[in-house]
Amino acid sequence: MTRFLLHTGILIAVAAVAAGLVVFLGLFNVSARGGHLPSVSWVLHTTFRNAVELRAPPAETVPDLSDPDLVALGARHYDAACHMCHAGPGEARTATALSMVPAPPPIRDAVSDWEPRHLFWIVKHGVKMSGMPAWPTRSRDDDVWPVVAFLTRVAGMSLAEYEALVAPPDMPDETAGADAASCASCHGADGRGRGNAQVPRLDGLGEAYIAATLAAYRSGARQSGIMRHAASTLDATDDARLAGFYAARRPSPAPTSEPDGDRERIVLGRSLAMGSPARRDVPACNACHGPWPDRRSALFPSLSGQPKPYLLRQLELWRDGERGGTARAHLMHQAARDLDDGELRALAAFYASLDPGTDP
């Protein structure tokens, strides 16, 4: 036993000396031109696959990813944040991407043998020593799933279909600058969200609120990996210009979301929004968010005509303490914390049924 321990100690000492020489004398060549030895590549890739499979969430936690609006939202974020490395489906990668070690695979190859739950973990957490970054925010898992929804469709998508999905609409003028075209790919040139129920309408929102919201996304005060990436390319001057552009868009006369059999929910939602005598512990929503004859504050957004799925998710985030925002965010944490799921759905249905043109 003594000889065994002695030999083991010698081996450990030799390994430590060898490791020290590699680290402190620079003996390991970190050049990307050299690449990895085949054995090193196998070890890294096998470790990567096993680590993802161990840590990915259970299959039963994967939400319904069939919504075309989720796919479209995910595609537009992918185009802004991921296309530079993985390219579009069937599109050649850039010479710079091909010079990385390891080179990021074409997007079809990258997703070909992963389940949605695996893709979620990879997109959210990233991969060390690969160039694959983690999601820009630590919270908001719901914000990651649109990208996964897109990735589950990309294998069967042509480059032409992809480009049609991510192309921004024609802009009416150049007053908002080049950044407006990027915003318009999701929110539309008119601010109406291009019919995507996962995206908020910007027409009818106040200029001060839009600018403050962009700043909140950039600082991380309001959580969204999609919007934090978008806002990170802007500064305060850009915020003001874009806010002025979208605040000047006039709301369409028709609501974004039809009642769709929600009559009872709308009645309950109206009661809650106007201050229900049965729920005196819940502040009246219209005091801040309308419908109103006169706007109460430049930092209070109108909710009339916003898409029902978007409204419901924001209300859930407020209630669950996962949503931040401008300096008034604490008011919503207090207002939403005691609402149950049925009441949240009712409020979303009520505000989605309103004509966005009813508020100034």
Image: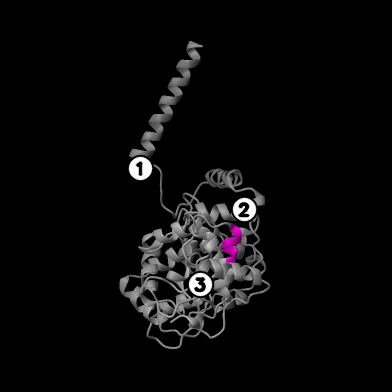
Q: CA distance from mark 3 to mark 1?
A: 52 Å
Q: Are marks 3 and 1 in contact (CB under 8 Å)?
A: no
Q: Nearer the viewer, residue 47 or 118?
A: 118
For the image, the number of numbered tags is: 3
Residue drawn where x is 50% and y is 83% of the image: 357
- Residue found farthest to the bottom: 172
Mark 3 highlights which residue?
200
Query: Could you tell me the amino acid type at mark 1?
Result: Gly
Residue drawn where x is 53% and y is 78% of the image: 167
Relative placement, left or right, of 218 versus 1 is left
- Residue found farthest to the front: 277
- Residue found farthest to the left: 237
Q: Which marked residue is nearer to the observer: mark 3 or mark 1?
A: 3
Q: Which marked residue is nearer to the observer: mark 2 or mark 1?
A: 2
Q: Quadrant of residue 175?
A: bottom left
Residues shaded magenta: 341-346
Q: Considering only order in the chain, which callout, 3 or 2, is on the residue closer to the N terminus? A: 2
Mark 1 highlights which residue?
26
Q: Quadrant of residue 258?
A: bottom right
Position of residue 89 relative to residue 336, above or below, is below
Query: Could you tell me the amino acid type at mark 2?
Result: Arg
Q: CA distance from mark 2 to mark 3?
A: 27 Å
